Image (cartoon, rainbow, N blue to C red):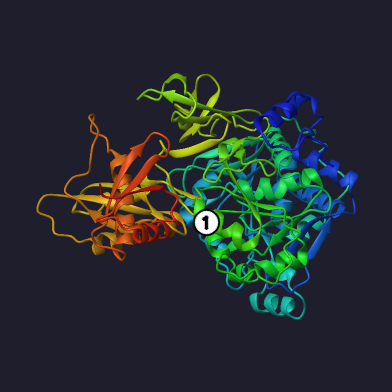
Amino acid sequence: MNTAPLIRTLHDIETIERTALAERDLPPSTFDLISRTAQANPNAPALSFLLQGNGEEQPLTLSYSELLGKIIQTANAFHRLGLRPGKAVSFLLPNLPQTHFTIWGGEAAGIVNAINPLLEPEHIAELIHAADSDLLVTLAPFPGTDLWGKVDALREQLPELKAILCVDMANLLPEPQRSAIKAQRGALPEGVLDFDETIAACPADHLESGRVIATDDIASYFHTGGTTGTPKLAPHSHGNEVAMAYSMNLVTRFGVGDVTLCGLPLFHVNGVIVTGLTAFIGGAEVLLATPQGYRNTALISNFWKIIERHKVSFFSGVPTIYAGLLQIPSEGYDLSSLKYALCGAAPMPVELIRQFEAKTGLTLIEGYGLTEGTCGSCANPPEGERRPGSIGMRIPYCEVSIKVLDEQGQYLREAQRNEIGNLCIRGPSVFKGYLQTSKNKGIWVDGDWFNTGDLGRMDADGYIWLTGRSKDLIIRGGHNIDPQMIEEALHKHPDVALAAAVGKPDEKAGELPVVYVQLKPGSQTCEAELLEHAAAHIPERAAVPKDAWIIDAIPLTAVGKTFKPALRFDAITRVYQAALHELDKAIRVEVQSDDKAGQLAHVYLPRADQALAEAIATRLSGYAIGHRIHHPA
């Protein structure tokens, strides 16, 4: 039972923090955390799994004692295969019970390296090498999946792997489908171990290694900094992950009897920590909603039925998920079990929050976090005042500061209230730096504060408002895209002199990648040809630009660097102008810097027309970038 004060204001956070985190008797490792909960609540449901998401199926459910047994067996299997502390097991899996066994068993035996299954084979190999992996866990061949094909194509490039283990999804099917698929497929490829058979041969009551895990031992690597480009791995210690779960649960207050639905991928910190370890520290049940999670159309179409049937208390998503769920009728379903939902990873349009809450009666909590902070750093208080458009206040034990830096990124001073600066974080959940030391240049400011690369301001009550990014990352539906990969691909085109990629606003994805192109003198290429070239040379589909806009000259700074703020403003202008064109062709849009919003679209009406102003407000309500309507004098 969570006996900490309810968080309504910063005062409540400070009250919680008066007892130092070190005095909270937190377990030293994620393994000890799950073990403690299993000892206290051995028969409580810990992990349930839905294979199809049709709303009718009976889930596979493991109690806490059963989950702990599977984790111990997995750790022992990895140990027998040669995994040791300081070495990594990589996993390339969808959301399955075995994915959880791999994560927590891998952390008990060594280090877990999470890999996005949607990446191309060459990028997967880079991440396996970068993590210095000894083992790899992936899917066995199964209809409708391509993971084994990706791994099989890479096997000759991965001679350092001591073993490859395959999770056979056929084992999750009832008979006779299970036997039919196995018979059609035949035996697993030579030299590959069956995951379930391998762990079943190991004891479930103790770690054979005898390992005593220290708080500072590295538990996991998570890839960050974009879905393309050179690997950048953020190591998390056991202490980072335990502290994050504890801090987050002071906000979510998960306890025995609560059910958290996990639809976000388990290669991402939100799925692993928020709807994972944070639930486990409180003794709640994690409902793993299909291998594809929110990508499963059946799950989305049956979402409210699943909420009602399984009495879900909480789920977490990104703006695109909530926009999609708005199209699914919720009337007639009993949603009384839902306490609230969390939205993070990308800015949430205020109008989308209003519509979603009005439609479902559900409280939607906006938050903020990043991989380098293990997961969350800020959230609107569920029991206090929520300020739509804000990412809320810092959560307990996560320090947040707005700092003013000079043009070289050096610390100048603390920002005043409502002054825009760089959002910086520190605390027990913040990592110590990237695995590749070359990536650590300039990431710390004013001592040990991590510069997130996001720009924001803090109001008088401690609520934080994002106003833009000093980083160039494009965030598409919560997934980071490195613009450098887009630019490098376009620079391979013989007619391109300069290319610069930014994000354009999108009602569903938050942002979509676009690229501005300056052609070489005398070149005659067209935008369609540039997009075709981009699609052929960019390995990650999500990073392929939606538009290629040819302009006379890419704007540059005084020192010759691409000036991307001007391009971002232009992209917003183009999108908003096109959206409003159908209302009145004479409407003019101009995007400017704003002291509070960071960037603001000014919409100028051709005439005094209140009905037109209201139509404009409605049309732009789905975008995260704010606007201001100007009537003629």
* Figure quadrant of residue 374: top right
Taking the view exactly as shown, the residue that stands out farthest to the left is 522
Q: In the displayed structure, would residue 620 be above or below residue 130?
A: below
* Location of residue 300 in the rendering, given as x and y in whole percent from the top left corner: 61, 67
Q: Is residue 392 visible?
A: yes
Q: Mark 1 points at which residue?
A: 352
132 horizontally vs 15: left or right = left
User: Which residue is located at x 47 percent, y 51 percent?
Assistant: 123
Instruction: Relative to 594, say whether 521 is above or below.
Output: below
Q: Mark yes or no: residue 216 visible.
A: no
Location of the N terminus (image quadrant): top right
Q: In this view, does 473 lie to the left or right of 210?
A: left
Q: Which of 538 and 376 is in front in this view?
A: 376
Q: Reply above or below: 310 against 209.
A: below
**Helix, strand or loop for disc 1:** helix
Q: Nearer the viewer, residue 110 or 40?
A: 40
Q: Is residue 425 left or right of residue 55?
A: left
- Picture residue at 54% right of the left edge, 64% below the top: 324
Q: Please provide percent x and percent y for residue 446.
A: 50, 19
Number of disc labels: 1
Residue 405, horizontal then vertical, whole percent:
41, 24
- The kind of residue on which mark 1 rests is Leu
Above or below: residue 264 compared with residue 417: below
Q: 363 or 483, which is in the foreground?
A: 363
Taking the spot 70% from the left edge, 51% from the top edge, the residue there is 102
The image quadrant of residue 309 is bottom right
Mark 1 crowd level (few <14, some 14–19, many ≥20, 10 Å Cα): many
334, 316: nearer the viewer: 334
Give the percent coordinates (x, y) of residue 419.
44, 28
